[in-house]
Amino acid sequence: MASTNTEVGVEAGAKAPFPPFQTETFASQLLWLALTFGLFYVLMAKVALPRISSILEVRSDRIAQDLDEANRLKDESDAAIAAYEQELAEAKSRAHAIAQEARDKSKAELDATRAGVEADLASKIADAETRIASIKKKAMSEVGTIAEDTASSIVSELFSGKVTKAEIASAVSSVKG
Amino acid sequence: MANDPISQFNISKLLQLDVGGYDISFTNSSLFMVATVAASAAFLIFTTSGRGLIPTRLQSISEMLYEFVAGLLRDSAGSEGMKFFPIVFSLFTFILVANLLGMFPYFFTVTSHIIVTAALAFGVIGMVIVYGFYKNGLGFLKLFVPSGVPGVLIPVVVLIEVISFLSRPISLSVRLFANVLAGHITLKVFAGFVVSLSGLGLGGVIGAILPLAFAVALTGLEFLVAFLQAYVFAILTCMYINDAIHPSH
């Protein structure tokens, strides 16, 4: 610095020292620095910094709150999805059970109906068979009398004489075996 | 005046004041101290007056400044150091704004005077010493006795530590003062070359291109220095505060 000082002295052509080393200005600079910097410090410490700090705090609180809210909503939607899926699964299994039941029931009904119908048919067949048998039997028994009548009319036509009923009956029964 | 690189540091009285034999005139230096404080305080207070949850551009500058200095202090001195936040913030902002205002042509640079930077540096060191003894009592002296030093070496190491501690306010103030001063002188010298060379006719104008380019580049560099020196001052303050809080490192 000393060399600069001399240079300045030479250049300026005056005895004035390098300005930063002019001690007579120190009192004024120190006083005004103390006043201005002191005021600045007070303004920062009491007004600006608390304000910025509260702004930042409010913002980070708000962000934290929003994140919490978002997490809560996410949990809620997760729970809703889980409940929905469970309900869906339950409904599916219930539907399955209902379908199975309906299928079983209709099958049972069908089986029962078929069994009834078959039994009915079987009894009807049996009835019909017995009726046929009785009719046949009756018809067979009636065949004798018809044959007797027919034979007697034929004989009376043929022989115009009288053949006794007893003779005819014995003849028919011998034919009938 | 145009080519004298020193006249920009002259202090001129704007309002003569004498109290008790002391010259406490309101000078151009005082004016720029007031301007520095007014500009930075007004900026910080008005841009945050909206207290916007979503910051405006200017509000986010204030917030960035706040978080930058807060991060600086918290990283160096831990959360315990945050009680010194207002002073570190004020120092950083004051020096930064004073340096940046000094970048305007014809403006006076407050930090180009050693008495101003020395006052700030001694203020910081005085605060560190007072708080160090207040908080740790005589334990603050452990600062000068690093742990893990062999017994024989202790006197030597303590001597070195004491000297290094005593040189702190000097290095702190001279660093800022010298950087600002040298930068402004260099800038002025190169700008002066441009003016005097271009007065020499066509050849001079062509020759002035190089110093002009230098002056432009130096202006950019000076903006960097303006920020960097404020940053260095602030971070060293943070480290000294950390020493006061945790003397046995």
Image (cartoon, rainbow, N blue to C red):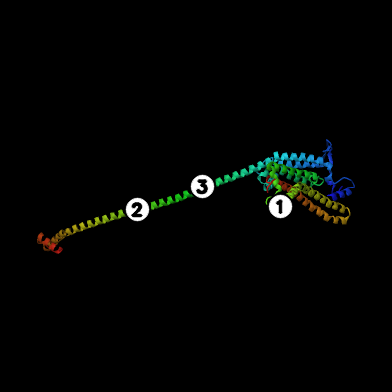
In this rendered view, identify the residue nearer to me: A133 or B241.
Answer: B241
In this rendered view, identify the residue nearer to me: A98 or A82.
Answer: A82
Label 3 to label 2: alpha-carbon separation: 43 Å
- Residue B161's place in the image compared with A170, above or below, is above
Q: Tell me whether marks 1 and 3 sit on the same chain.
A: no
Tell which tag, 2 or 1, sits nearer the viewer: 1
For marks 3 and 2, the one nearer the N-term is: 3
In this rendered view, identify the residue nearer to me: B220 or B168.
Answer: B168
Mark 1 — on which chain does it sit?
B
> Local crowd at mark 2 within 10 Å, few (<14), some, or many (≥20)?
few
Q: In this view, does B147 lie to the left or right of A79?
A: right
Tell which tag, 1 or 3, sits nearer the viewer: 1
Tell which tag, 3 or 2, sits nearer the viewer: 3
Q: x%, y% of residue B172? A: 76, 47
Q: Specify the amino acid type for callout 3.
A: Ala
Mark 2 — on which chain does it sit?
A
Q: Tell me whether marks 2 and 1 sit on the same chain.
A: no
> Local crowd at mark 1 within 10 Å, few (<14), some, or many (≥20)?
few
Check disc 3 and report its element: helix, strand or loop: helix
At horizontal 30% and vertical 55% (from top left) the residue drawn is A118
Using the image, tell me which numbered label, if any, was put on residue B152: 1
